[in-house]
Image (spheres, rainbow, N blue to C red):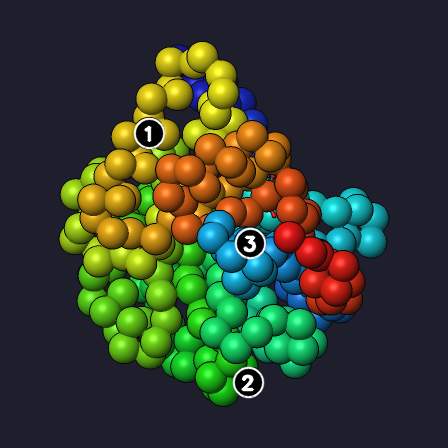
Amino acid sequence: LTLLAGLLLACLVGTLSYYLMRVRNSADHEMLEGMRRRQFHMEYQPVIDTRSQQVAGVEALMRWRHPREGNIPPDVFISYAEAQGLIVLLTRHLFGLIAQDALQLREVLPVGAKLAVNLSPSHLTDPEFEHDVQQFIGQLPPGHFNVVFEITERGMVETEDALEKFDWLRQQGIEIAIDDFGTGHSALIYLEKFRLDFLKIDRGFVTTIGRQTVTAPVLDTVLNLTRELRLKTVAEGVETPQQAHYLREHGVTYLQGYLYSRPLTPAGLKEFVTRYHP
Ligand code: C2E
Ligand code: MG
Ligand code: MG
Ligand code: MG
């Protein structure tokens, strides 16, 4: 490398990282502003009890309606917040949003209804984690909801002291679900080790039902395994009556998907519950 080329390269990289930094700073700023300006809200997707066919609870899913960009998918802004160290702030914000919705949710959901909330693994290791959780629980109507924290497989495997954190959560009466099961490391040993309450079967497996694909037998293996381990199961992304029927026949505990409902605002959920007759 000649000196000139080296200098040019250094300039280029320097300029690039300067622009990258500016882009990042402004995206961070947008996210913080978004929280301040109430651009985030929560939607709730009904979870159906396979046996009774009744609404057993909801999963809370975060939404960002940006004034210029429109709706930004949670996959995108959650990973961004994780990468930028903003996820703890964002999760605290969503705890607050759920707490604000809680009275409306209580009106339409029975006592003991599940309220599932997605947690990012990096929050588990934050020094304020226990405090944040207690604050959140304290803002919910006492004794009404059965709070479930959903954590992805990857998150569990990569989190130090996950077992201690989960034990502490269980002492607070919170259940733990492994989310998107089958898409990550699939270390079956963790099912035992973490003493999980729920396993969420990823949509990718549900879509194999009734189709001759290489991965189709995997679903049956997972279903056998969860029966053996007496884990409760939630099947995600149920879109057809055929899928629902198969999952029911194979002992899945709860069903969630567009077949029943998309994620809804609290008002939409109220409407859904009133007209839903299994
Ligand atoms: P997830 O926790 O696995 O959530 C399930 C996703 O599947 C949701 O997408 C839901 O809208 C979608 N879904 C539900 N039923 C069906 C169906 O029948 N068909 C299809 N095609 N999709 C269905 P969404 O809301 O876009 O969220 C995507 C992911 O973003 C979530 O996956 C979760 O990992 C993350 N996320 C969403 N909200 C939050 C949050 O509040 N906190 C954290 N940490 N992550 C969140
Ligand atoms: Mg989830
Ligand atoms: Mg999932
Ligand atoms: Mg997912």
Q: Is residue 127 left or right of residue 6?
A: left
The mark lying in front, picked from 3 and 1, is 3
Counting other residues with Cα less than 10 Å from the Cα at mark 3, is it few (<14), some (14-19), or many (20 or more)? few
Cα separation between marks 2 and 1: 39 Å
Which quarter of the figure has residue 12?
A: top right
Q: Secondary structure at mark 3?
A: loop
Instruction: Identify the mark nearer the N-term, 3 or 2.
Output: 3
Residue 169 sits in which quadrant? bottom left
- The residue identified by callout 1 is 220
Foreground of the two, 111 or 2 = 111
Question: What's the residue type where badge 1 is placed?
Answer: Asp
Q: Secondary structure at mark 2?
A: loop
Q: Determine whether, in the image, residue 63 is placed left or right of residue 211.
A: right
Q: Position of residue 161 (x, y in %)?
A: 20, 61
Question: Gap between marks 3 and 2, in whole Å?
Answer: 25 Å
- Residue found 69% across the figure and 56% down from its top: 277
Tell me whether the residue at label 3 lies in contact with that at label 2, contact meaning CB atoms closer than 8 angstroms. Answer: no
Residue visible at 41% across and 51% down in the picture: 253
Q: Circle 2 is placed at which residue position?
A: 141
Residue 16 % position (x, y): 57, 33
